Image: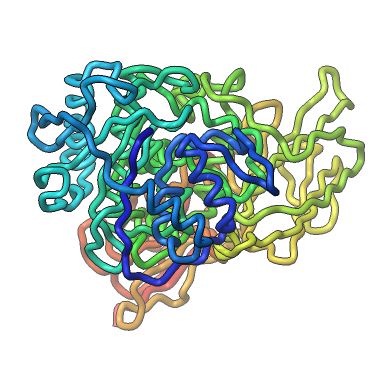
Amino acid sequence: MKRLSLIFFLIPALSLFSQNLDSLYNDFLRIEGLPHYVKGHVVTSVGAPIKCGFGTINDVKLNFNNFKPEQKKFIASVLQRPATDTSFVSPAGRFRIHFFKKGNDAPLYDLFELAKAADSSYNFEVNILGFPAPPKDGNAGGDDKYDIYIQNLAGGLYGYTETDQQITDSTYTAFTVIDNDFGTGYYTHGIDAARVTVAHEFNHSIQVGNYIYRPTDTFYYELTSTSMEEFVYDSINDYYNYLGDYFGSPNKAFSSNDGYDLAIWNIFLKDRFGFGIIKRAWELMPSERALHAIAGSLQDAGSNFKIEFNTFGLWTYFTGSRSVTGKYFKEAFNYPLIQPLINTPFTRPTTTLTNTSEAVSNNFLVLNDASSSPANTFVALISNCDISGGISYPVKINSFTFTLSSQPFSDARKVLDGYYTKLDAVNSFVFSQSNIFNNIPIAEGQIISDNIDYAFPQPFRYSSQQTLFFPVFISSDGTAELYVYDINMKLVYSGQKRIVAADKVVVPWDGIDSDGKKLGTGVYIYITKSGDKIKKGKFVIYND
């Protein structure tokens, strides 16, 4: 049997928001490969497979004093740093790998390849992505190198990273334990499974060593670590095996997922903004809950969660048989199809649907219009972007009403000839919407939000204001072109700007022309262009 370690930290026990102590204890038993005790009966298998024991092991440690006496006795007898008979140092000298030469725990894959994989994970995540290296653990494990232990883990458990020595109130040194063979019960086997597991678990050690360990955001720890598997080892693709959970229930609150199924979120962000946005979110994590950290990183990148979450939903629609070569996810063909919240006929002239929505979720409404041959398919992608509600426990439930009509009606938006929509909700600001018609995004996937037709503030004064905002239509890539002319139609500024969608949909400008100078007092003309959509008007500047 594998052995685990326990350091009894002198910190307050943390409340569990996602599970009670008994279910946590049962998950711990599953990781140990032992039977569960549910209502007096021994149960050998309960719940979905646990890919990574990171959250369970460390939640048990943080809540040790809250368990029942008999549970505490067993936990204390089992949790200790693994003992092995052999170890060696990786080629780059950064890892010490511990294992048994013989017996049930002996590794059945090439250890030199494992050591190279550990060094490759370090090189990519630290040297290329710029994450800080995990803090050293002194002489724990024999020296200050990062320790990886190879053990025969319970079926299906790839590995786990365990907090060890406390550094600050919320950071720790850590070590990693991985399976010895990745045989029966695993999606990926042998050395390939070991490679992605090392990439995954090493990132956990970066998270808890340099930023924070917060049990209530475990989904984001797993999301990030699972995405690292793909970034470090693009050809292995173990993450495919978990995508069905998200694609089957995109209407479930984002933070209610286990995170293994959400690696595509970081893949999406990397393709949109580059790797830096992922690191930025982790820099915000010590002071922000995960969803706020994500939103903050998007704001720092010049975008907005409302735009990006709906755009992410659009990307998840074009997968499998609907994938488009050269657009959206590069590996989209291998992903499952998204499951709609509702799939119903469109009964002309008007169909109205009322639904409940979990905070931070994507809701796909499919309306099939049989009035033509072949039938048309109209998809409304309704994104609930209620971040505060998504952090609460239980997550906040919002209701909304969506109407599709073949005729104009009060406050409706025309999206195509013969198709008018309206979205009603008590808290309408947390929702965004885009539409797809016969598997083609309408207006390049334009996200529907509150549009205005004026620049503000008016007049703009350099002495008291820093930013001018111009109205714009939202585009699928979240950018627009801005052109500013003087009253004689001389172009004084042009550039691509990131769209901001808050209470108004706008692009910002600091009032500095293309030569880096402030403009003179006068009337100016602006034009914003997103795709083929244009807005234009006049504004006044006072250079006082």
The colour scheme of the drawn protein is rainbow
x%, y% of residue 125?
23, 39
- At 39% from the left and 36% from the top, the residue drawn is 227
- Measured from the top left, where is residue 436 in percent x and y? 67, 34
Q: Residue at x 34, y 73 (%)?
A: 466
Q: Nearer the viewer, residue 333 or 36?
A: 36
Q: Is 235 displayed left or right of 449 in the figure? A: left
Q: Is residue 424 above or below residue 142?
A: below
In the rendered structure, the answer to whether residue 218 lies left or right of residue 424 reads: left
**Residue 1 visible, this angle:** yes
Asked whether residue 536 is in view, the answer is no
Of 479 and 230, the residue lying toward us: 230
Name the spot of residue 48 as percent of width and height, x first. 58, 35
Q: Quadrant of residue 98?
A: top left
Q: Nearer the viewer, residue 516 or 302?
A: 302
| 121 up-or-down from 172: above or below | above
- Residue drawn at the location 9% of the way across and 45% of the way down: 143
Residue 516 drawn at (x, y percent): 21, 61
Q: Quadrant of the N terminus?
A: top left
- For the image, the number of numbered tags is 0
Quadrant of the snapshot with the C terminus: bottom left
Q: Nearer the viewer, residue 27 or 395?
A: 27
Residue at x-position 17% and y-position 53%: 135
Relative placement, left or right, of 457 versus 447 is left
